[in-house]
Image (cartoon, rainbow, N blue to C red):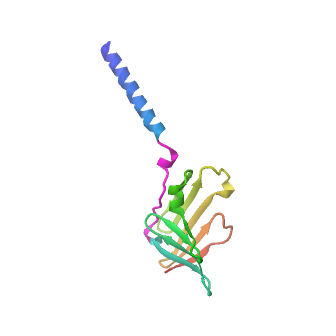
Amino acid sequence: MNDLINKNFSQYFFLCIFFFVLSSCSKKDIENDSFTPPDWLIGTWDHENPQAILKTYIVTTDNIVLEYPNGDLLDYGARARENDGYYIREITNNDAEYKYELVDEYNSDPEQAYIVTFRKVSDNQITNVNSLQHTGPSEYNRR
């Protein structure tokens, strides 16, 4: 009889521990707040026309920053780390394409999803499309 009680207690105890651990993990704990871009994408990429550089992507091993000509920076990794409800969901990461979504948990409108796609054209050229731009791909050259 004692063995049966001990066995039931042990099962109950481990079940409680399991649910405690599961409930203590938030979605933010599970999702990313940094990037893991492929090696071919790491570097500085300029989108330019004959007159000027229009914008620059700075891609590191764990972050992507968009720099505008006036010096303003859009640090995607910082946005995910510093804002509750934002996280990075990587969609594609291979030898030819890197695609991610900056997820805003408070915005459920799929039309407002911010999805960015980088495609490798050559070692020194990529294209970039972001879902809110609604234009064709922009070309970027390695600096």
x and y percentages locating residue 135 in the rendered image? 68, 70
Quadrant of the snapshot with the N terminus: top left
Q: Is residue 121 magenta?
A: no
Q: Say above or below: 8 vs 29.
A: above
Question: Which residue is painted at 45% across and 66% down in the image?
Answer: 38
Q: Which residues are magenta?
A: 25-39
Q: Is residue 4 left or right of residue 87?
A: left
- Name the one closer to the observer, 66 or 61: 66
Residue 89 in sight from this viewpoint? no
Q: Is residue 113 left or right of residue 19?
A: right
Question: Which residue is painted at 43% across and 69% down in the image?
Answer: 39
Determine the residue located farthest toward the bottom in the rendered image: 50
Determine the residue located farthest toward the top in the rendered image: 1
x and y percentages locating residue 137 in the rendered image? 62, 72
Residue 54 in sight from this viewpoint? yes
Count the numbered circles shown.
0
Q: Main secondary structure of the magenta part?
A: loop
Question: Which residue is painted at 64% across and 63% down in the image?
Answer: 131
Q: Is residue 76 left or right of residue 107?
A: left
Q: Say above or below: 108 vs 135.
A: above
- Name the one closer to the observer, 71 or 39: 71
- Name the one closer to the observer, 10 or 95: 10
Q: Say above or below: 52 vs 102.
A: below
**Res. 133 image quadrant:** bottom right
x and y percentages locating residue 46 in the rendered image? 54, 78
Q: Say above or below: 49 vs 59.
A: below
Q: Is residue 35 magenta?
A: yes
